[in-house]
Image (spheres, rainbow, N blue to C red):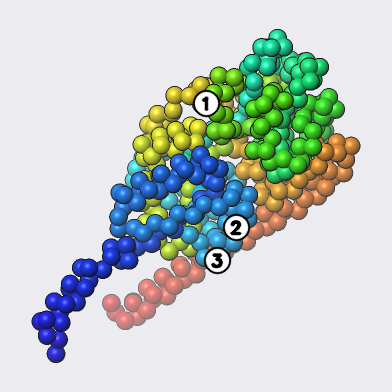
Amino acid sequence: MITRAVISSLILALALTPFAARAEKLVINSNESDPAPKETFTKVVDEFKKQNPDLQVEFNTMDHEGYKTAIRNWLTTEPPDVVFWFAGNRMKAFVDRGLLDDVSDLWQKNNYGQVFKSTLPAMTVAGKQWGIPTSYYQWGVYYRKDIFDKYGISVPKTWEEFLAAGKKLKQNGVTPITIGTKFPWTAAGWFDYLDLRTNGFDFHIQLMDGKVPYTDPRVKDVFANWKQLIDAGFFLANNSNYSWQESAPFIMNGKAAMILIGNFFTQTISDDMKDKFGFFPFPTIKPDLADGEDAPVDTIHIPAKAKNKAGARKFLEFVAKPETQEMIAAGTKVLPANTEAKAPADPFLEAGAKLLANAKAAQFYDRDTNPEMATEGMKGFQEFMAYPGRLDSILQRLDKIEERVFKEQAKEANARAQDRLQGKILTRRLVEQSNDITLSQGR
């Protein structure tokens, strides 16, 4: 028999147990490893902890490149409760494999279709939403205004003006374009814009969807324009030895004058240098094909195998709030995805908002196409920049890869559709059998 004294002791012991030990655990994995984003999202998570003391939050940050590989293993084995990721095909690839949770209920409950109107298409697959957008941002050319002024160079609006600007910089001992292609996604930015300006947005998306071969003459036109820059010596020498961060000092110290990159680049500009930098959209090659822009959407998701989906949904709703999105935008120099959030007072973001207001937005090469195709395509772009004479063999190789991966993708999609159909048939049969049993028992 348990005495009153024993019961009192148990109650006291429970009361003295540290709260954190009883708190439910929530694991969040992030790829925001650059200094400014890492600091910003740490503050976001800390604020979430304050508002949700019932959750014991574990926040892990991993380097950007390693994360891309690791997430594929997590999602299929022991995933965290929340993952940072990307919209577009990168998200869809996981959705198609059943690795992300449908969060359409959150969108409906909070009317996210209105406040996230511009990013809604990027978050939707098969009529459902699979995550929350944290932000988006423009790509374009960042340049040294003081160097342009020194040599009497105007901001180029056309391809011819861009070539002339680069030629003048070369004549004065300045590398026109800094770039680091150690991680080849930076080269993909050049492919995207040259294709958007040479062939237009619709063609670009068809290529991303595997509907156009890489040996198509129109794709070769893209590389012909790119080769003009390579042959003229516009790019930083030995750029495959540098990451984009390692290539940035060349523009900071004035040895280079331009860089094509996303607005996250502005995080690297010190306060005393900001008045020396400007931004302009990628120049027009064909006047009627000037409205396509890269505007990647960064996202957070709940893995299908997450253990704490209730806590994860709380975090997604927290990040979707205007005040949280404003915190993210201010710290990472991006545009808030929530239209009720105010963008930071920043000339680069103001230029980006203006640029994207009426643009057709692509996500970015490695977010718009099949993941395996993206990996091989970017290797090809990197190789082309170092060895432009290998173009024909590169494109032939990409053709074979494209044909294989999209054929496999279609086969997998058909198999999943058949599995879903068989599941529906089985469910219907079970229901019919249950009804038959009920009727036979007279109930």
Picture quadrant of residue 140 = top right
Instruction: Give the residue type that dot 3 points to.
Output: Thr
Q: Residues within 10 Å of mark 2 (few under 14, many from 20)?
A: few
Q: CA distance from mark 2 to mark 3?
A: 11 Å
Mark carried by residue 70: 2
Residue furthest out toward the left: 4
Residue 440 rendering spot, x and y as whole percentages? 35, 80
Sooner in the amino-acid sequence: mark 2 or mark 1:
2
Q: Which residue is mark 1?
A: 271
- Give me the residue at 10% from left, 82% from top: 4
Q: Secondary structure at mark 1?
A: helix
Q: CA distance from mark 2 to mark 1?
A: 35 Å
Sooner in the amino-acid sequence: mark 2 or mark 3:
2
Instruction: Give the residue type that dot 1 points to.
Output: Asp
Mark carried by residue 245: none
- Give me the residue at 76% from left, 31% from top: 236
Residue 190 rendering spot, x and y as whole percentages? 71, 32
**Going by the image, does 337 lie left or right of 109?**
right
Instruction: Give the residue type that dot 2 points to.
Output: Ala
Residue 152 vs 371, above or below: the answer is above
> Along the line of sight, which residue is nearer the eye, 146 or 123?
146
Residue 294 rendering spot, x and y as whole percentages? 61, 32
Q: Secondary structure at mark 3?
A: loop
- The answer to whether residue 342 shows anywhere in this view is yes
Q: CA distance from mark 1 to mark 3?
A: 44 Å
**Going by the image, does 320 lie left or right of 154?**
left
* Front disc: 2 or 3: 2
| Quadrant in which the C terminus is drawn | bottom left
Q: Which residue is mark 3?
A: 77
> Along the line of sight, which residue is nearer the eye, 61 or 405?
61
Residue 392 vs 354, above or below: the answer is below
- Give me the residue at 59% from left, 48% from top: 64
